[in-house]
């Protein structure tokens, strides 16, 4: 049990170590960044929270079909409880990521803006819950979508600025705008602003990310609820 909880922290940190060698040392992506390890740590751990929102719904209804057949309750409780458990499990890794990133540049001091990562953490998991609701319904009736969703999650990893900054695409305005429109990138960038830069993300970013979070959650809930009567028949 304790190893399981510890692994939730060690696993992303080991990923950070591998990516730091590959992208920071070998590919020189870290060039021009003062605290690349902190930048990467936030990227890997916080992307993991968002990415899991896509994949944790895969096959969730099918794996819960015994309970769904035996008891009568709102079916949305299944994906929402999985999302809540994920949010609780993410608290420790989030604290470690933020603390590590801040301590790696301790000479610059720690700004109060680090506290703004709390509402960002909440928004991330609201959006994650919405994605879980959507993928839970999709994979309940079309199991083959699990592979596509997992591929989408891996693709987003490379298009969300986990290990590089969007400024690298200054000479490619179309690609840069696509990156900036990606809410996954928006969340990672905002957390980095609060922790690494000591600045408050602009109000436009808060509005944009809030719309994505609550829009995804409300849309996901309605989408999932529309098939409420069919989940007990999933084989």
Image: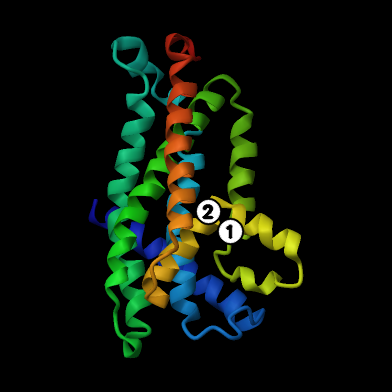
**In the rendered image, the vertical position of residue 5 relative to residue 111, given as above or below:** above
Residue at the left extreme of this rendering = 2
Question: Who's the residue at 49% across and 86% down the image?
Answer: 34
User: Which of disc 2 and disc 1 is earlier in sequence?
Assistant: 1
> Which class describes the residues within 10 Å of circle 1: few (<14), some (14-19), or many (20+)?
many
Tell me, yes or no, whether the two marked residues, 1 and 2, touch with CB atoms within 8 Å: yes
- Place of residue 91 in the rendered image (x, y in percent of width and height, measured from the top left): 28, 55
Total labels: the figure holds: 2
Q: Is residue 59 visible?
A: no
Q: Is residue 148 visible?
A: yes
Residue named by callout 1: 160
Residue 92 left/right relative to 64: left
Residue shown at 41% from the left, 76% from the top = 196
Mark 1 falls on what kind of element?
A: loop
Label disc, if present, on residue 184 of the rendered structure:
2
Residue closest to the eye, 40 or 120: 120
Left or right of residue 231, residue 31 in this image: right
Q: Is 168 placed above or below 104 here?
A: above
Point 51% across, 33% down: residue: 58
Task: Pinpoint residue 26: horizontal percent, then vertical percent.
Answer: 65, 81
Residue 49 location (% of width, % of height): 42, 51
Residue at (41% x, 61% y) in the render: 11
Q: How far apart in space, not on screen, are marks 1 and 2 (Cα)?
A: 6 Å
């Amino acid at each position: 049990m304790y190893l399981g909880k510890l692994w939730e922290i060690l696993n992303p940190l080991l990923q950070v170590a591998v990516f730091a060698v590959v992208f920071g040392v070998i590919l020189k992506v870290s060039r021009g960044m003062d605290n690349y390890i902190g930048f990467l740590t936030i990227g890997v751990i916080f992307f993991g929270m968002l990415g899991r929102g896509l994949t944790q719904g895969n096959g969730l209804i099918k794996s819960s079909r015994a309970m769904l057949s035996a008891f009568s309750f709102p079916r949305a409780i299944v994906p929402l409880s999985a999302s809540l458990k994920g949010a609780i499990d993410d608290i420790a890794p989030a604290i470690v990521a933020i603390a590590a990133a801040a301590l790696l540049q301790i000479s610059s001091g720690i700004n109060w803006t680090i506290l703004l990562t709390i509402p960002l953490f909440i928004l991330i998991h609201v959006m994650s819950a919405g994605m879980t609701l959507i993928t839970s319904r999709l994979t309940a009736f079309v199991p083959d979508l699990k592979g596509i969703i997992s591929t989408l999650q891996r693709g987003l990893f490379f298009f969300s600025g986990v290990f590089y900054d969007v400024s690298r695409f200054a000479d490619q305005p179309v690609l840069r705008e696509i990156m900036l429109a990606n809410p996954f990138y928006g969340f990672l960038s905002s957390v980095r602003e609060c922790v690494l830069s000591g600045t408050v993300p602009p109000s436009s970013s808060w509005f944009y990310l809030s719309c994505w979070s609550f829009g995804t959650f409300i849309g996901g809930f309605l989408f999932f609820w529309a098939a409420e009567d069919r989940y007990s028949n999933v084989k």
